[in-house]
Each structure stands twice: as structure tokens, then as C-alpha cells.
Amino acid sequence: MQKLKMYLFASVTILLLLSGCNTKETNKDIFQYKDSYVGDNSAVGNIVYKLPGAQQLSGIELKTKEEPYGIILNYGWEKSENEYKELVIYNTTFLFTLVKNVDWITVKSERKEYTVTKEDLQNWYGNDFSNIETAKELRKLVQQNLSNENKVSEFLH
């Protein structure tokens, strides 16, 4: 009887551990939030916490009282200036693609503050990225443009 109890306990423990390791369900694709709105603080928060730099994020402010609507992201950023610029472009691109009614995003840290508008960023890409349907496709677009350091510095001067 004691052996049976131990066997059942071990089996249940192993099943719980294995089901906890299944990140496919708990870490769904970020594009599940596509067409969210600035006023949906849960969706915006979930997006931001899936983006690079989430560990350094110290706060999110949603500006929804009057148009144009915006998002302010506050970071405790300690990495290089170039990495910070990449973070700004990467994260604003994802937010503009996924959050339907956001017009501007300000990214702040002790290092620097950048305000990016959706229109300016789409002009920088030369592309309306609202039609992009997958994270892989969007990451590819971002990486192609981040590879040109001069282009990045011109945009975020």
C-alpha cells in the first residue's frame, strides 16, 4: 500500500512538472493582441512585458483622455546608447503594429527620452506595417532597418 501511494505521488509530481514546462500555452504569440486599443491597459501591459527590455521597465502610462492617444514607457536602462535606440525602434514598431489607436509613444530613461509618432515611424520604414500579421514578419522588417546604424541615428537624433 505504501509503495502504491509513493508511486501515485511520484506520478502526479512528474505530470505537474511536465505540464508546467509546456510554455506553448502560457507564452502565446504576441500577435494575439493585434488590434488592441490604448485604453485596454491589460493588453498594452501584456504586449510591453513580452518585448525586449521588460526587465528594466519601471512603469507604463496610457494617455487616453484626449486624442492623439499615447503611451509612455519608463525604463531604468543601463545598457549602451545603441542598444537603447534599438529598443526604442523595436518596441515602438511592435506597439504601433499591435495597438490600433496609438498615435505616439514616448520612451524614457535616465539616458534619453524619445517620442516617436506612428506616422514618422511608418515613413522611416517606407512601409505601412499595420498589415503585418506575424511576429516573425515584423521582426524581419525591424532587423532589416536596424542594421543601418546611420539610418537609426538619423531617425532618433
Image (tube, grey):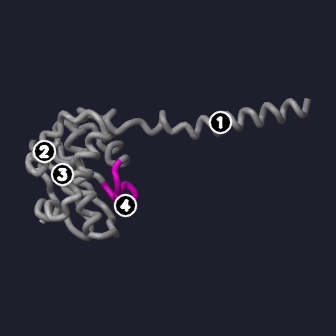
Q: Amino acid at mark 2?
A: Asp
State the mark number for residue 16: 1
Instruction: Estimate the spatial distance between the alpha carbons at disc 4 and disc 3, rounded to whole Å.
Output: 17 Å
Q: Residue at x 29, y 42 (%)?
A: 44
Circle 2 residue:
103
The local secondary structure at tag 4 comes to: helix
Q: Amino acid at mark 3?
A: Ile
Q: Residue at x 20, y 53 (%)?
A: 145
Instruction: Estimate the spatial distance between the alpha carbons at disc 1 and disc 3, rounded to whole Å.
Output: 41 Å
- The reply to whether the magenta stretch includes residue 151 is no
Picture layout, residue 139 above or below residue 115: above
- Badge 3 local density, few (<14 within 10 Å), some, or many (20+)? many
Q: Earlier in the sequence, mark 4 or mark 2?
A: 4
Circle 3 residue:
105
Q: Residue at x 40, y 57 (%)?
A: 55
The magenta region covers 51-59
Instruction: Estimate the spatial distance between the alpha carbons at disc 3 and disc 2, rounded to whole Å.
Output: 7 Å
Residue 34's spot in the image, x, y percent?
A: 27, 34
- Badge 2 local density, few (<14 within 10 Å), some, or many (20+)? some
Q: Earlier in the sequence, mark 4 or mark 3?
A: 4
Circle 4 residue:
56
Q: Quadrant of the N terminus?
A: top right
Q: Earlier in the sequence, mark 1 or mark 3?
A: 1
The local secondary structure at tag 2 comes to: loop
- Badge 4 local density, few (<14 within 10 Å), some, or many (20+)? some
